[in-house]
Image: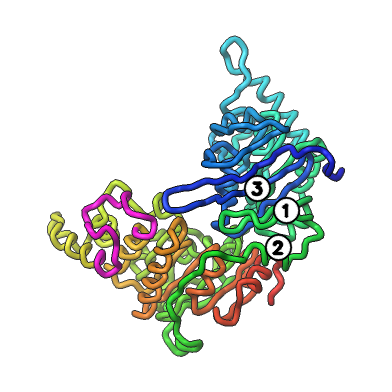
Amino acid sequence: MPEPSTDSAPLLVMRGIVKQFPGVRALDGVDLEVRAGEVHCLLGQNGAGKSTLIKTLAGAHQPDEGTITLNGEEVRLSSPIAAIRLGISTIYQELDLVDGLSVAENVFLGHEPARMGFVGRGEAARATRELLERLGHAEIRPSTEVGRLSPAAKQVVSMARALSHDTRLIIMDEPSAALAHDEVGNLFRIIRELTAQGVAVVYISHRLEEIREIGDRVTVLKDGRTVAVGLPAKETPTSQVVSLMTGRNVEYVFPERPAPGSHDGKAEVLQVRDLSIPGRVSGVSFSVRAGEIVGLAGLVGSGRSEIIEAVYGARRFSGQVVLEGKPVRRGGGTTGAVRLGMGLAPEERKAQALLLDQSVSRNISLASLGRYSRLGWMDRRKEAADAREMVRALDIRPSDPERPIKTLSGGNQQKAVLARWLLNDRKLLLLDEPTRGVDVGARAELYAVVRRLADEGIGVLLVSSEVPEVLGLADRVLVLREGRVIREAGAGELDEHAVLDMIMEGSPV
């Protein structure tokens, strides 16, 4: 692959980009320079500002301050369409393909070739075939329904769609997360062929071994700021990159946890034995004791959320999941898990846990409606009284239980999700990214709530992308990589740098 020129002016220059949302400054003067024909890697922990930056570059967000220059001319990316017309395409981690449409229909969705007002399906198929051949995947048929394709093939279709817009810059957000090892090699081959043709690639990944293999230069974000611009990807030591990523301006405030060994001898609330999910998780075994918080640390795609889903009965698996001596059915549905005594705070609380137009009270009572039903009638007074008690106990603010839950902050919405399960006799709480979208002050309150629940004897299984959160809140940590546990230890025995080294490099420390 030819080296990108260091003499020519950059293809893209972003200077002093600022983006604010209510209560948070997501980008605080970020700089980025990308050259034609290079793979420029964008690194940073969750919350560093990567997603906001690429959405700004994709035209989905408008910067509050700063400038964007493309090919030497200042541009305004007022919408995703405007960005595409200027030659900027984005391939998000969650591919936005339409499964029910054909490959060709997806590739040209929104800009179908037309003649005399009619869509030229033959022309679309021919052009799609040429793009797939350019990407080295002539075996993918333009007429195939996208829903029938493998994740790797869908990735190729997304690239073909990007190239159908005469793209000069492609942004790839965690493109290897759903790919097997051999598929990653094919992805890199395609990227090298694109850059050899002068296309620039902004590549986002947590996997440092990938950065060294495919990257030319690296920019690192931390807490919405640029802490390094244009580092050589292959020569910069891993330790330096990890240090740049982990330095923090915001301190995490965690409640005091019990001394090591405090849970020894307590009953095992949850037992997981040889849990496997094809292509996702392989031979994972662990337990959670009464009153213990067990954290799962790993990258996106490491199997963390899949383990949570399997334990909760939402995903088929092989192996055993036992809650207080009672087996959880393998993909038998979540109702059985709830009846056994589990509760779940899912990663996407607005989409998966909340009825946004309903009251705080109804969202809290949602899993317990049976206790308020008498001969077909709802005891609204009892429901409201219990909700008020939970609002008081968890200090949910504002304290009006009849207020629509969509008007609450992220932290208070999450408290309401936890309150839902406390109305029942829960044995185990599953927390998937419990502080995502929650501001710093509310995080400390949520940490205190979770610790208090554990102190009352509830077992907790915690997933978080933020390593300090796992280490600060959990009693014991399982470090995951590519669906396997590579280290299990007391949280006090690990530090952030060591865990990041493990999950990025795969070597136990």
- Estimate how packed mark 3 is, as few (under 14), some (14 to 19) or many (20 or more) residues with alpha carbons within 10 Å: many
Q: Label 3, on which residue? A: 31
At 47% from the left and 87% from the top, the residue drawn is 259
* Residue beneath disc 2: 241
From the viewer's perspective, is residue 360 above or below residue 65? below
Quadrant position of the N terminus in the picture: top right
Q: Residue at x 52, y 40 (%)?
A: 61
Closest to the observer, 53 or 187: 53
The amino acid beneath tag 1 is Val
Q: Amino acid at mark 3?
A: Asp
Q: Which residues are magenta?
A: 390-412
Q: CA distance from mark 1 to mark 2?
A: 9 Å
Q: Quadrant of residue 426?
A: bottom left
Q: Which element is circle 1 on?
A: strand
Going from N to C along the chain, the mark reached first, 2 or 3, is 3
417 within the magenta span: no
- Which residue matches tag 1? 218
Image coords of residue 407 (percent x, y): 31, 50
Nearer to us: label 3 or label 1: 3
Amino acid under disc 2: Val
Q: Nearer the viewer, residue 65 or 251?
A: 65
Disc nearest the viewer among 2 and 3: 3
Instruction: Kindly tell me whether residue 299 is visible in this rendering.
Output: yes
SS at mark 2 in the image: helix
